[in-house]
Image: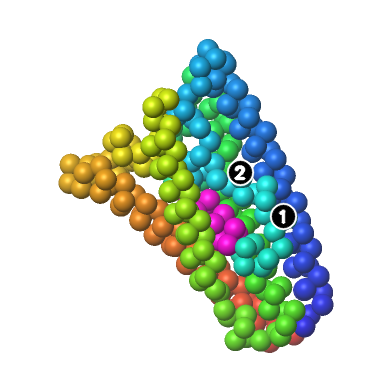
Amino acid sequence: MNKRNFSTLSYFSHISDIFFFLCGIIMLSSEIWKQFALTFTLGGGSYNWWYFPFQLCSIPMYILLAYPWLRHKNARLTILAFLMCYCLLGGIAVFADTSGLHYPLPALTIHSYLWHILLIIIGFTAGFTYICTLRSDKEKTLFSRTLLSAFPLRPFLYSTLLYLSCCLIAELLNLSLDKFGTINMFYINPDYRMQQVIFRNLLPFLGNTGVILLYIASTVLGAFLFFLLWKLVWRLSLRSRSGRGRRF
């Protein structure tokens, strides 16, 4: 075991814990400001359930506050997998159609853009933390090429269960709070036609329910493609590491 490498990986993990927690605090604080601005500055004191903070891009705000306190390795890997796949997907995909980022109040528009840019930064940080966590865990036991080549799929599967659980909660919120106003968490409320770009064009062929199910499945597929990209990064890092070992 290379003690210097292990120390560096542990230090990076510690710094990432601080980074994630600070991001969670910043996101929560800015979300509270956003809700007040939407309710009192734009809404005249009337709350608009459309902006209730439970979209895919809102979930990281909640889990980032909990992540540094998790000590079970599998739980931490699951959260990292969610951030580096689903969070990153949500942060990038929104720029395919930025109409939802614009508000009558310029400060809210700026907030929306910065929020999703931060999601992308968090996603990349989570990916590298995931890799460092795996490498640190392997080096603590045995520096073996066989062990280091493992890039477990289970954390992604658990993160997908987390995503699907959030979809279920979002649907319960949609159906329960519909009577209080317009609400469409995760954009899967069956009472509203799908609005997401590309998917809305499939409504005449699949119907609203079919498009919603396709949207959920496509999100899982998109997140899995990101997981495969991270696996490629992992293998390239191993190849680079192996090359340095032979050279010296």
The residue lying at 41 percent from left, 25 percent from top is 181
Q: Residue 76 appears in which quarter of the rendering?
A: bottom right
For the image, the number of numbered tags is 2
Q: Is residue 103 above or below residue 193?
A: above
- Tell which residue pokes out farthest to the top in this image: 44
First along the sequence among labels 1 and 2: 2
The residue lying at 30 percent from left, 52 percent from top is 214
Residue 235 is situated, as x and y percent measured from the top left of the image, at 56, 75
Give the magenta part as a residue range: 78-89
| Amino acid tagged 2 | Met
Q: Label 1's element?
A: helix
9 falls in the magenta region: no
- The residue where tag 2 is placed is 61
Q: Give the color scheme: rainbow, by chain, secondary structure or one colour.
A: rainbow
Q: Which mark, by number, is residue 68?
A: 1
| Amino acid tagged 1 | Pro
Can residue 229 be seen in the rendering of this structure?
no
Residue 217 is situated, as x and y percent measured from the top left of the image, at 35, 56
